[in-house]
Amino acid sequence: MNDKLSAKNYIGYTFCDTANNLAFCVMGTYLAIYCTDILGIKGTIVTVIFWIARIWDAINDPIMGTIVQKHKPGKGGKYRPFILWAGFPLAISAVLVYALAGFPKLTSNETVNIIYVAVTYILYGMIYTVLSVPYGSLAMVMTDKDNERSNLSVSRAIGGGFGNIPQLLFPTLVMVGGDDGQQMDGKRLFVAMCIIAVAMMSIYFISYAWTKEKPELILLSSEQVHITSTLKDVIKDRAFVTMSLIGGLVIAVQLYINTANVYLFKDFYEKSGFGTIYLVISYLPMALMIPFANKMIRAWGKKAICVVGFSISSVAALITWLGHFQNIWVYIILAFFVNAGIGFVILEVWAMCGDVVDHQEWVTGKREEATNFAVFTFMRKMGQALAAIVPMLCSFVGYNTDKEFIGKQAPEVIKGMYNVSTFGPFLMIALMLVLILLYPLDKKTTEQMQADLAARRAVELDEKELPEAERLLNSDE
């Protein structure tokens, strides 16, 4: 287990989340406004569709985790093959979700639109799970070194950042209909999704080719899974529970802000193009942290950095909400500080997921990374469900989806939408601050856990047959 990961391995792991996010960021940011403004679906119904999809995930994620955990390694490894098996269908399903945008004559019946979006979006979510659970588990069998796990998490965050390119381009390329470009152009949206799908499939192929699994770490992974027992262990583990909740909330606040900003920039500030500037500013703090992430972790530990970060973000989010700023530049500058605080956990969330999976192994003696990871990703799906409340809240403050009102909402509606856009993020970030204070894995405890696990794994490997696993993993080279 002394072989270091190569730059090629890191890039391969990075690329998979780039491909994932090319479609995911469009789903998280533009699906709501596509449903309300292009298909004429009421915001409350849109939220219900999103919630139904997440309820199905409550069933789908643990099942997928069990299937992946029981999957025996063969040509390509235990987890890598899923990048191709699920990646290509995922790209196609992403196009299907937005297919009605390319054929406006088919969008006249609201009931048909509702059924179509519900079916295709749930299909997309199912396939995403088939990919995301093994992809997350892949990091656990690529390395067992804490610094390399951290680098993989940062790599995944970088990959996800590059995958957000559609968010940079859509405000000027897709939000171009109507006066001053304040409306979505459905045909351009459909063409963009077709291009994205082709890019996704190409990138998944490279990711598969450039990643690798270590046979000794696969041997440590249990193929005997008892999901009820696993869930009981997880629920009793304070480290796992608190970090899973934080993982869900951090994606919730990202998606909530992204979705709300599309409406906010379109109707409150009447400057849709500023969505690109906002996104650049929001990612800048994370970009500045990347060279120093491992040094910060070695000096203070992940928990201490998160406590400081969430404190900064909470204060900035509170000021944004209470200030009700009419100047868009003030709003964007405050966004820098909101994201400066949560930026570290966005970079390190997958490394911290690895920590709590290791913690489960430490306290139970069982290594079940796929099922543990499925529970973690399920909480991330719950975060997506929480973010999906945005269109419903917009409806509550009076947002009108009738064609003649798109881009021309009443003043009291616009004021309410500012509160919707800013109070939710403050509340979620404040809750993450409370949770990280309860998180038990400080620097000292984490170091002790890793030392104990290293010793335990060395003994276990002496009792297992390594050559057979190596033969299976090398058989495709």
Image (cartoon, grey):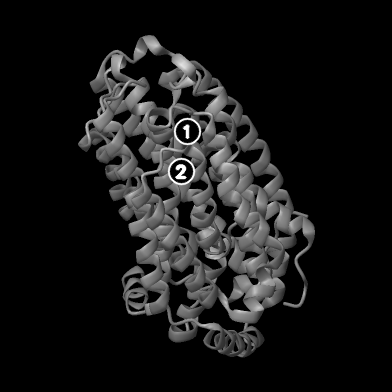
Residue ID at (61%, 70%)? 218
Q: Is residue 229 above or below residue 443?
A: above
Nearer the observer, 172 or 13: 172
Ranked by sequence position, the earlier of labels 1 and 2 is 1
* Residue 42 percent across, percent down from the top left: 25, 28
Q: Total number of numbered labels?
A: 2
370 or 295: nearer the eye? 295
Camera-side residue: 46 or 267?
A: 267
At 63% from the left and 73% from the top, the residue drawn is 217
Instruction: State the residue at coordinates (37%, 64%).
Output: 430
Q: Percent position (x, y) of residue 373?
A: 47, 64
**What percent of the width, then of the height, locates residue 169?**
59, 30
The CA distance from mark 1 to mark 2 is: 8 Å
Q: The disc labelled 1 sits on which kind of residue?
A: Ser
Q: Disc 2 designates what residue?
A: 127
Examine the rendered structure and indicate whether residue 30 appears above or below residue 424.
Answer: above
Q: Is residue 368 visible?
A: no
Question: Going 59% across and 84% down the picture, which residue do you hit?
Answer: 450
Screen quadrant of the N terminus: bottom right
Whole-percent x, y for residue 110 in the image: 25, 20
Picture quarter containing residue 19? top right
- On the image, numbered disc 1 is attached to which residue? 93
Q: Is residue 28 left or right of residue 205?
A: left
- Asked whether the residues under the numbered discs 1 and 2 touch, taking CB atoms below 8 Å apart as contact, a structural biologist would say yes
- Dot 2 lies on which element? helix
Q: Is residue 166 visible?
A: yes
Would you place residue 465 above or below residue 348 in this image? below
